[in-house]
Amino acid sequence: MLTNKVDIIAIIAKEIGIQRHKVEHTVKLLADNTIPFIARYRKEQTGELDEEQIRRIDELNKHYTNLEERKAEIIRLIDGQGKLTAELQAKITSCTKLSKLEDLYLPYKPKRKTRAGVARENGLEPLSTYLLSFPTSGNPEEEALPYISEAVPTTEKALQGAMDIVAEIIAEDADVRSRVRDQTRRTGRLVTSGRNTAEDKTYRNYYDYSEPVSRILPHRVLAINRGEREEVLSVSVEVDENPIIKWLSGKYLKEGSVTTDYVEKALRDGYKRLLAPSVQRDIRNELTEKAAAQAIMVFSKNLRSLLLQPPVRGKVVLGIDPAYRTGCKWCVIDNTGKLLETGVFYPTPPLKKIREAEEILSGLVNKYGVTAIVIGNGTASRETELFVVEFIKSYNKPDLSYTIVSEAGASVYSASKLAKKEFPDLDVSERGAVSIARRIQDPLSELVKIEPQAVGVGQYQHDLPPKQLDKKLSEVVESVVNYVGVDLNTASAQLLSYVAGIKPAVADNIVHYREENGAFMSRRELTKVPRLGPKTFEQCVGFLRISNGKNHLDATAIHPESYDLACRFLDIIEAGLNEIGSSETRAKIAGADVAESAAQLGTGVPTLRDIADCLARPGRDPREDLPLPVFRTDILSLADLQPGMELTGTVRNVVDFGAFVDIGIKNDGLVHISELSNTRVRHPLNMVSVGDVVKVWVLAVDLERGRVSLSMRNKGAGI
């Protein structure tokens, strides 16, 4: 029986292939530390496990702890019925899967009224025992005579009730359920057919569709589930029942008995009426859970890539939120994101006041030195883009260019309490323009203001379990924020709330303290913030940066607990604190033997290695190593595209079946998984990420449906 942490730790270590002592130390750390803190600042204890491995250990530890609690509860409940045997208890305590555990509990689980339950109430359980004893002589009808009553008026009713009990016994046998579930999982097929299809075009591929359960892809499962919910599809799991019935017969039936025919009839009834539908539901649930887990994984990886898009620094930006009748709302923000001016012009139908819009745009470019125009990709985006391109051509300013960004979530942010607090004097659409403009200056700071589900980089996110999705996406945002680091003196409360250890109320207190007392000049000053105690300080402080503070190390990812260590290392390489980041110091660090220095300083190599990296590049933003967004000065249309044409685009979304790439037309083109590489690709995420700038070739153009098929395989591959 799994009764303590040691046993659980052994199971976790075996399941994920990590040495037991690493798992044990990590579980201890997880008791009172955040995962980002453990991953970054406790590498010696964890054996340098990364954040993903630590999260997996945390998930499994919670899972197996909950499993132990469920076992104890089931044992208590069965024992309370007086039906707990030593053999049953041993089976329960040896379970490592929840499904197996619930199978064992099923016969003892309180149920709503069933046919077997009614038969038991009518005193027919001894008669069912008689049927299963398989006597070789006697007459079952005579055996049924004593059971006749007002509720059971005939021997036929008595025998039927006994068979109902036998059917339930067979259907609730844990070994039987496991075997039938496995058989259905291996050989069953998911079958769909159309219903109410008159108005439907979305699900026509599934009107007459069948695929093995073992091979169906996750995104198809989610599509089929949605079609079923919308009552366009009928869905079932079908399996050849003959091998199952044959196996059940071999397990339960005995030839030469006067009750064999009765038990066989009960067996077939138990399978068709009780077991098969239950297993079908189990299989459907399994498929849905796996598909949801896959979709959440894809969504989380896309979100991480989106949040890690590099900031475009040093540009004065004009953001445009396109529209038709109500006009295009615009704003200008300076190179720090400060709002300078907002307004509206009407270059799109129905008004098409192009000359007036050109005059406004020209005045803004001259007044503020605008160098980048950012257009949201929603309604009227195409017409707005055409206007901007013509303006850029006529204006003839070499450093003026434009890009299109996803405006997913901008409307959600614009109507939020946070937006109202940030811009109380702006209307909803003006706030949307500010959000669009800021998305290239610092995508992370802007996108954390939006619920992760609204950022538009997933597949079937509205069909996924909300709690699981919220949890995973919050973990992604937390991970990215702590990976990048946060400027303590400019970060919003929303951004600060994702820093390890900082809760929303404390984030608000940090901002209030900053507003009342001015910029933080030292990390230690954080201890003066209300409700930010020693533990919170320990967890968060390494992820908060102060530029131009009293201590140069406050601008790095070095934790204050290691400041003395960092200074002693600088003494070893003969460098000063005010020289960190210089080319001379980088050269000295590159020439140092970190392992030898760690031994000399009495610390671990991983910790000193991280310290050395921070001293070499104290202000490094890890996003700077990634490609910047593509800025354009001209435009493409579908009619311009020809098969074989080479283009540069930006990956906007990655799904199970491929990647959508922005090539500068209204709709993103699709690179199918088969066109991502000349070699086989297991999943598109192995090849591309959101934000990647890629070279593509046009495969085909569907003018009628506005679709473009692209390839990332080179021309030598036959394009």
Image (cartoon, helix red, strand yellow):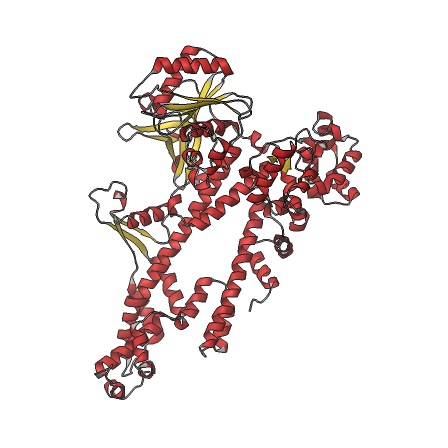
- Rendering quarter of residue 113: bottom left
Where residue 250 sits in the image (x, y, percent)?
Answer: 34, 73
Q: Locate the N terminus by quadrant.
A: bottom right
Between 500 and 86, the one nearer to me in the picture: 500
Where residue 27 sits in the image (x, y, percent)?
Answer: 61, 55
Decide if residue 154 is on the left or right side of residue 493. left
Decide if residue 39 is on the left or right side of residue 398. right
Where residue 334 sits in the image (x, y, percent)?
Answer: 53, 22
Q: Is residue 625 above or below residue 129?
A: above
Residue 145 in view: yes
Decide if residue 34 is on the left or right side of residue 521. left
Q: Is residue 310 above or below residue 7?
A: above
Residue 254 in view: no
Q: Locate the C terminus by quadrant.
A: top left
- Rendering quarter of residue 249: bottom left
Between 540 and 681, the one nearer to me in the picture: 540
Report the residue that reaches farthest toward the left: 198
Q: How many marks?
A: 0
**What residue is drawn where x is 49% and y is 72%?**
75
Decide if residue 300 is on the left or right side of residue 228. right
Q: Is residue 213 above or below residue 629?
A: below
Where residue 14 sits in the image (x, y, percent)?
Answer: 56, 57
Between 412 and 384, the one nearer to me in the picture: 412
Between 586 and 537, the one nearer to me in the picture: 537
**What residue is drawn where x is 25% and y is 43%?**
204
